[in-house]
Image (tube, rainbow, N blue to C red):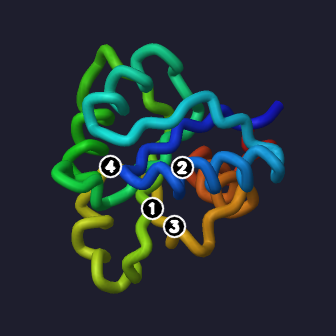
Amino acid sequence: MALRCLIVDDSLDFLRIARVVLEREGLRVVGVASTGTEALRCAAELRPDVTLVDVDLGGDSGFELVRRLANDPCLDPGHLILISAQAEDDLIDLIEMSPAIGFLGKLALSAVTIEGLVREARGGLGQPS
């Protein structure tokens, strides 16, 4: 069964492209959000298996958003993965302090890398679904 994915990014072009790429590779994109407020609403309504969150959401911080998503007992965002066009090395301390299971550069975004992070977070057992 395909992972159900929510994508959070302030770039509408990126949201459109990421949705097409990930769905073509077998993930099921159940929703997209371009602000923190939209992301919180979508996570509550959609209950995805995995939520991809851009670290820079214009006026919002993706790092703060993943903390809010992880700490609100009313939400079920699934596994949280930070994404960015910035290099991981530039953000490593913030990534490590976050509740996210990992980080992916936007150019490395693929169903295989997302499924790998989820599988690793689940202890490496079985299928990613």
Amino acid bearing label 4: Pro
Query: Residue placed at 23% from the left, 35% from the top?
Result: 68
Tell me the element at label 3.
Answer: strand
Seen in the picture, residue 87 relative to 79 is either above or below; the reply is: below
Locate residue 28, reporting x and y percent. Answer: 72, 35
**Which of pointers 4 and 3 lies earlier in the amino acid sequence?**
4
Label 2: element kind: helix
Residue holding disc 4: 99
N-terminal of the pair, mark 2 or mark 4, is 2
| Circles 3 and 1 in contact, beta carbons < 8 Å | yes
Spatial separation of the CA atoms under disc 4 and disc 3: 14 Å
Measured Cα–Cα span from mark 2 to mark 1: 12 Å
Q: Which is more N-terminal, label 1 or label 2?
A: 2
Q: Is residue 76 above or below residue 105?
A: above
The quarter of the image holding the C terminus is: top right
Q: Residues within 10 Å of mark 4 (few under 14, many from 20)?
A: some
- Left or right of residue 115: residue 46: left
**Label 2, residues with CA under 10 Å away: few <14, some 14-19, many ≥20:** some
Whether label 2 touches label 4, CB < 8 Å: no
Mark 2 or 3, closer to the camera: 2
Q: Which of pointers 2 and 1 indicates the residue nearer the eye? A: 2
